[in-house]
């Protein structure tokens, strides 16, 4: 018998017939798109007098579709080499993809501000109530105003729709959905990596080449392929509705989150209330899912969720009132702007009550997004999987996404309200020089001093802390959950609220006491962060000794 | 209502009484029967508990067993003892060595077979290693029941090394059939003693790490302290043995009290359940263990902690056995068809879960007339209904996990 190598067995085999069929389907669709594009061009130019919307929808969109399908045919034909290339370049693709997304959002921001500028300068007398079929700008105006490197008709047609509000809203929603999906996939992979490292394992290592970065993608594909079960006695419409009711509010909350001073889809005056409401509405999906499943364990999970949410919303809201009291607005952008002067100006370090409120809020937020040690609604060792017991496939996936989206939302709230929102810990004065420089210096200023990267970094750090807690602590019992809320957290929040009231009334801004408290708390915060970094570096350097050499010596990449 | 109420007001009152009130229709509560198992993450196999619940309260929990019944005892009446050894592996599959050990001892006593000294020591080493492995699983899964995932992985990392040792000795990692009638099936492989010592040196300090990670964890103690308290007299009345009995404060360990095999040659201590502030015995040189506040003798925490401390003393026993390990035969030649005399032998040994007893009755044939096993898990499980009464739903896994049953042995 010939030698059988592991690679030969593990190598994916393509069914040639299936491959040919897939290519043929794509080719037919691509040809159809190309024909539509050509026909659309004639119709748009000759019948509709070259109206931009017609050109966009009838010609450019089908042409792009045809190109995409052609790329698909090529990808199937050269699947082997492409796969090897992807595997070899996994790490650059991963980081390049992240960078590319940032650039994409950046370009979109530039495009919208360019269009805004054009509307303000070239078409001041434009009639109000512009509709999709007649805006203040024509493609010719945009083309004339385009600077040299992007001076071409296609760009002007692409920019033309941006002058309409609904189009921007759709783009914003696409951005939010894209961000939530990407974040959820990243967080699922990362949670598994964090869990692996805490448990002296490696976590996912196979899919995608570099540290299993494509694991969530593979999981998602697997989940979509799963059998979609609905239990016999289930309330079918409610059972189907529940995952969306859990996922959509978490998504909606992102609309009001300020990723930067101008990086917010809707700058609401009551943004905080809106986000809190969305976090609160999520519970309905969970309760509905638990009830509609017709399963006693699901019902238990739903009841626990209801009980937990109702009790923890109170301390959560109360602790969030404290920074609101200090800043004096519910608008998250304004709250962020109040913390622009670096580390020392962050709200958590303003006075002792705010500092305490931050920790109280963090604990309440753990409970509100069902994370350990408050993961009672889905406590697997007691309730099998709680409210998710009967869910499978895509619906289960939505619940899962909702959980991670909610994790980000509560962390983003903590970031905005306590930890300086999108501002860097460096003092703003340091950045003045950079901001006045050329475009490179401006870019560096944007990167280092403010902007979505800081916001996302801080929020993800808090998400990491949630994961850290989850993989370290046991779960508490339902009576202890309520005890912790009513007897510990609620009085703590009340004392902090009252204390902050008196502080705001009695201690003047800029007084010696306020300054002293500010400096001391900033130092405590700095020591906490530095301590974390020191522990991290120490653990990294001594990981073999700490883990125990017997177990890890033969592991690759340990 | 006063007797002289005017008749005019009565009809209305009666109509109100007939109408269902909010209390009687909408807010009416009733007890709910919930099936916990046989497929449930924390029933440790195929245990099925029928819970009578009122909201989060569990009013009663009734275990239903038999999902893993494989007629082990009946099979014992149709096989020769050496053929029955693999069946004992599958009773308490987490402590197969100990099962082999007790069965071999019972048959040897009945048939009058002498065992070489070296084999006796190898048996002790293997049995104690398996006790550590079994307690590691118990420790890890108990953390899992409480929602702490990480200790489970740590426990299995250590257990893996023990399984490697077993694999080196007999080729199997779960069902060993290594200790057999007349000795052990193979001699210890080359380098076994050194690797075993290496493991013990590595493992012993880790126990304190587990204590700091899980045993003294505030949430963990809150979840397990004063939960599922079994009083000493109840423990004895229900026939509990092993850590469940010792957790209730009864210092009863067959290895110490009625030493079987060669356990009388080793010095070791027996931990029992203690009140807060108590210090269970630990070997010299190891960090002191302490019982945290809130703990009650006989509660889930004490049962769990007895197992953790027992791992210390198993390490000590293995060290002594390795030091004293003589050279010589590892097995006496036992003929294929040993005629079992017309007599019966009942012998009990201390398994990780309690006292495992084998009754072997011979009738002059090579095949025993009767093989009966007294499983510790079976007897320990019997107290479930008594303990899981008026507790919270989350306490049920805490209690079942602390009783630490293996369903393979309960159902046999």
Image (tube, coloured by chain):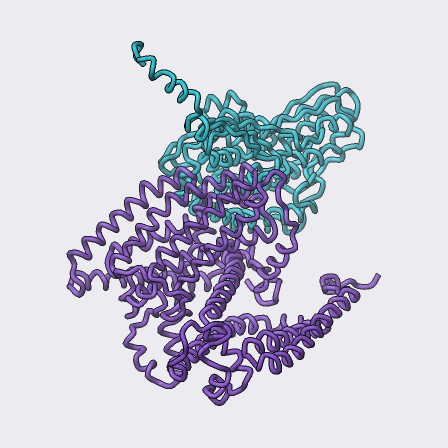
Chain colours: A purple, B cyan
A316 over B355 or under it: above or below? below
Image coords of residue A126 (percent x, y)? 41, 79
- The answer to whether one can see residue B272 in this image is no
Judge left or right: residue A371 versus residue A153.
Answer: left
User: Relative to residue A3, is residue B264 depicted above or below?
Assistant: above
How many dots with numbers?
0
Residue A404 at what x, y percent from top left?
48, 56
**Spot occupied by residue A340 in the image (x, y as percentages of width and height):** 30, 69
Q: Residue at x 66, y 79 (%)?
A: A38
A436 horizontally vs A57: left or right? left
Residue plotted at (62% across, 62% down): A206
Name the residue furthest right. A1
Which of A353/B288 is in front? A353
Determine the residue positioned at 43% across, 24% down. B19
Residue A293 lies, with reference to residue B103, above or below; the image says below
**Rendered-image quadrant of the N terminus of chain B:** top left
Residue A539, x across and y down, in percent: 44, 61
Residue at the spot x=46%, y=46% of the render?
Answer: A284
Of A172 and B113, nearer the camera is A172
Along the line of sight, the residue nearer the viewer: A475 or A408 = A408
């Amino acid at each position: 018998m010939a030698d059988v190598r592991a690679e030969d067995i593990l190598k994916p085999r393509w069914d040639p017939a299936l491959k040919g069929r897939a290519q043929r389907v794509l080719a037919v669709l691509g040809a159809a798109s190309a024909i539509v594009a050509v026909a659309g061009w004639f119709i748009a130019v000759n019948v509709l007098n070259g109206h931009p919307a017609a050109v966009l929808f009838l010609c450019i969109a089908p042409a792009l579709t045809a190109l995409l399908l052609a790329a698909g045919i090529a990808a199937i034909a050269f699947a082997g080499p492409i796969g090897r290339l992807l595997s070899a370049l996994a790490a650059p693709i991963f980081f390049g993809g992240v960078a590319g997304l940032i650039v994409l959002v950046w370009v979109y921001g530039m495009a919208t501000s360019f269009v805004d500028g054009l509307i303000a300068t070239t078409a001041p007398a434009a009639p109000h109530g512009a509709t999709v079929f007649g805006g203040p700008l024509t493609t010719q105006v945009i083309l004339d105003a385009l600077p040299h490197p992007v001076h071409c008709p296609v760009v002007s047609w692409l920019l033309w729709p941006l002058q309409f509000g609904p189009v921007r809203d759709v783009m914003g929603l696409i951005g939010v959905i894209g961000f939530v999906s990407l974040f959820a996939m990243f967080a699922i992979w990362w949670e598994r990596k964090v869990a692996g490292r805490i448990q002296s394992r490696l976590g996912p290592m196979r899919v995608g080449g570099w540290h299993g970065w494509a694991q969530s993608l593979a999981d998602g594909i697997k989940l979509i392929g799963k059998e979609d079960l609905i239990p016999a006695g289930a309330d079918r419409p409610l059972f189907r509705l529940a995952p969306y009711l859990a996922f959509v509010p978490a998504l909606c909350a992102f609309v009001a989150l300020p990723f930067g001073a101008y990086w917010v889809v809707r700058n609401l005056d009551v943004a905080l209330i809106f986000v809190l409401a969305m976090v609160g509405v999520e519970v309905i999906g969970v309760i509905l899912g638990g009830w509609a499943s017709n399963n006693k364990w699901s019902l238990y999970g739903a009841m626990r969720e209801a009980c937990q949410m109702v009790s923890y919303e109170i301390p959560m809201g109360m602790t969030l009132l404290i920074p609101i009291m200090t800043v004096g607005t519910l608008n998250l952008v304004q709250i962020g702007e109040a913390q622009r002067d670096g580390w020392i100006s962050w709200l958590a370090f303003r006075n002792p009550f705010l500092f305490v409120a931050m920790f109280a809020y963090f604990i309440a937020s753990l409970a509100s997004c069902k994370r350990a040690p408050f993961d009672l609604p889905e406590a697997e060792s007691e309730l099998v999987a709680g409210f998710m017991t009967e869910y499978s496939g895509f619906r289960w996936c939505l619940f899962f996404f909702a959980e991670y989206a909610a994790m980000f939302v509560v962390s983003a709230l903590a970031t905005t309200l306590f930890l300086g929102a999108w501002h860097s810990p460096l003092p703003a004065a340091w950045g003045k020089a950079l901001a006045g420089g050329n475009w490179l210096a401006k870019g560096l200023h944007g990167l280092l001093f403010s902007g979505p990267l800081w916001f996302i970094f801080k929020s993800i750090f808090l998400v990491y802390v949630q994961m850290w807690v989850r993989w370290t602590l046991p779960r508490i019992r339902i009576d202890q959950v309520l005890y912790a809320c009513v007897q510990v957290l609620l009085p703590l929040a009340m004392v902090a609220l009252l204390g902050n009231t008196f502080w705001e009334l009695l201690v003047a801004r800029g007084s010696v006491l306020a300054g002293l408290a500010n400096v001391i708390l900033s130092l405590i915060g700095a020591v906490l962060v530095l301590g974390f970094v020191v522990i991290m570096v120490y653990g990294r350097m001594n990981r073999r000794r700490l883990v125990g050499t017997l177990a890890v010596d033969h592991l690759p990449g340990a | 209502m006063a007797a002289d109420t005017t008749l005019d007001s009565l009809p209305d009152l009666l109509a109100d009484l007939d109408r269902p009130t909010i209390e009687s229709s909408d807010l009416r509560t009733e007890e709910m029967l919930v099936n916990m198992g046989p497929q449930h993450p924390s029933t440790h196999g195929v245990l099925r508990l029928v819970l009578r619940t009122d909201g989060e309260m569990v009013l009663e929990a009734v275990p239903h067993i038999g999902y893993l019944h494989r007629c082990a005892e009946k099979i014992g009446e149709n096989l020769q003892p050496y053929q029955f050894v693999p069946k004992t592996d599958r009773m308490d599959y987490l402590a197969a060595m100990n099962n082999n050990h007790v069965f071999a001892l019972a048959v040897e006593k009945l048939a009058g077979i002498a065992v070489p000294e070296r084999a006796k020591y190898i048996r002790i080493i293997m049995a104690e290693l398996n006790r550590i492995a079994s307690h590691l699983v118990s420790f890890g899964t108990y953390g899992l029941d409480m929602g702490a995932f990480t200790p489970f992985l740590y426990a299995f990392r250590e257990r893996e090394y023990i399984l490697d040792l077993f694999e080196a000795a007999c080729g199997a990692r779960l069902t060993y059939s290594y200790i057999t009638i007349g000795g052990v099936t193979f001699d210890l492989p080359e380098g076994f003693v050194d690797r075993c010592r290496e493991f013990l040196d590595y493992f012993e300090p880790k126990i304190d790490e587990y204590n700091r990670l899980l045993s003294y964890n505030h949430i963990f103690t809150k979840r397990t302290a004063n939960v599922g308290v079994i009083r000493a007299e109840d423990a004895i009345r229900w026939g509990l043995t092993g850590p469940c009995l010792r957790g209730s404060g009864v210092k009863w360990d067959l290895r110490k009290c009625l030493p079987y095999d060669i356990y009388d040659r080793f010095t070791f201590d027996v931990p029992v359940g203690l009140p807060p502030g108590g210090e269970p015995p630990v070997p010299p040189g190891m960090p002191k263990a302490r019982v945290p506040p809130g703990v009650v003798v006989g509660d889930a925490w004490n049962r769990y902690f007895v197992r953790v401390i027992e791992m210390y003393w198993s390490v000590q026993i293995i060290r002594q056995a390795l030091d004293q390990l003589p050279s010589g035969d590892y097995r006496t030649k036992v003929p294929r068809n040993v005629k079992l005399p017309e007599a019966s032998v009942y012998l009990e040994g201390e398994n990780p879960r309690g006292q495992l007893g084998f009754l072997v009755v011979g009738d002059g044939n090579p095949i025993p007339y009767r093989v009966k096993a007294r499983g510790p898990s079976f007897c320990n499980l019997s107290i479930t209904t008594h303990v899981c009464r008026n507790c919270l739903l989350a306490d049920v896994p805490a209690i079942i996990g602390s009783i630490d049953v293996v369903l393979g042995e309960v159902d046999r």
